[in-house]
Amino acid sequence: DTGVSQDPRHKITKRGQNVTFRCDPISEHNRLYWYRQTLGQGPEFLTYFQNEAQLEKSRLLSDRFSAERPKGSFSTLEIQRTEQGDSAMYLCASSLVSKAGELFFGEGSRLTVL
Amino acid sequence: RKEVEQDPGPFNVPEGATVAFNCTYSNSASQSFFWYRQDCRKEPKLLMSVYSSGNEDGRFTAQLNRASQYISLLIRDSKLSDSATYLCVAYGGSQGNLIFGKGTKLSVKP
């Protein structure tokens, strides 16, 4: 399967703990996006990379959130000192620069903060 | 004001009906527009791009009105399998990211 893969699919953690999600995009895609989605809402933009460069971060992304894409391939999203409000589905997507609106999403990583 | 706004629905229609969704966007610099489909508890998937001249893909027709800053999606001859949430997306302008609306839920009944 050469689609976008995310790991873990589910994560339950206690408030205050750190969590890290990983995303492996489609191999030839140079753009990688992170979105967050809660029930009844559309995906909410967090950040995106073009190759290894992080080009944009949402104002909603507090300093507890950090994302990396060190070699322009896979990406990680870390949330430090988790809060209950961080509970959501974290979606990763990738695309070609030439087809930037055509995102391919992974199945998501569902975070539950107790 | 949200950047991309949609009527959340739900739209409950019988099989075979024609249904239309509208979406408005606030950033006049947005360059491209798309409709995505999201099934319950699944990831969003691209349904179709929206071209300035309007475009059709089988039973689906998308149109863009830049002057009024709205996008529409028309579904003809609705099928049970069309039941999903339809997400309107704007891309470009001053940002390189894609902005999603909250989605419009469609339920097609037998």
Image: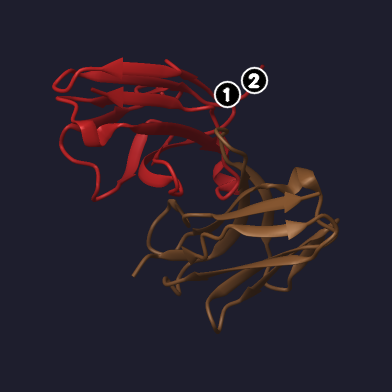
At label 1, the amino acid type is Ser
Is B7 placed above or below A28 here? Answer: below
Of the image marks 2 and 1, the number of the one nearer the N terminus: 2
Is A110 placed above or below B3 here? Answer: above
Discs 2/1, front: 2
Q: Do the residues at pointers 2 and 1 share their chain?
A: yes
Check disc 2: other Cα within 10 Å, few if <14, some if 14-19, many if 20+. few
Question: Is residue B51 toward the left or the right of residue A83 in the image?
Answer: right
Between the C-alphas of marks 2 and 1, the distance is: 8 Å
Judged from this view, the residue extending furthest toward the bottom is B67
> For the point 52% across and 35% down, which residue is it?
A94
> For the point 67% across and 51% down, which residue is it?
B107
Residue A112 x/y as whole percent: 32, 24
Residue B6 x/y as whole percent: 51, 64
Question: Is residue B64 toward the left or the right of residue B79 in the image?
Answer: left
Badge 2 vs badge 1, beta-carbon distance below 8 Å: yes
Question: Is residue A113 toward the left or the right of residue A76 in the image?
Answer: left
Residue that numbered label 1 is attached to: A27
> Of helix, strand and loop, which one carries label 1?
loop
Q: Chain of mark 2?
A: A
Check disc 1: other Cα within 10 Å, few if <14, some if 14-19, many if 20+. some
> For the point 23% across and 50% down, which residue is it?
A59
Q: How many marks?
A: 2
Q: Which chain is red?
A: A
At label 2, the amino acid type is Thr
**Which residue is nearer to you in this view: B28 or B83?**
B83
Q: Quadrant of the N terminus of chain B?
A: bottom left
Q: Colour of chain B?
A: brown
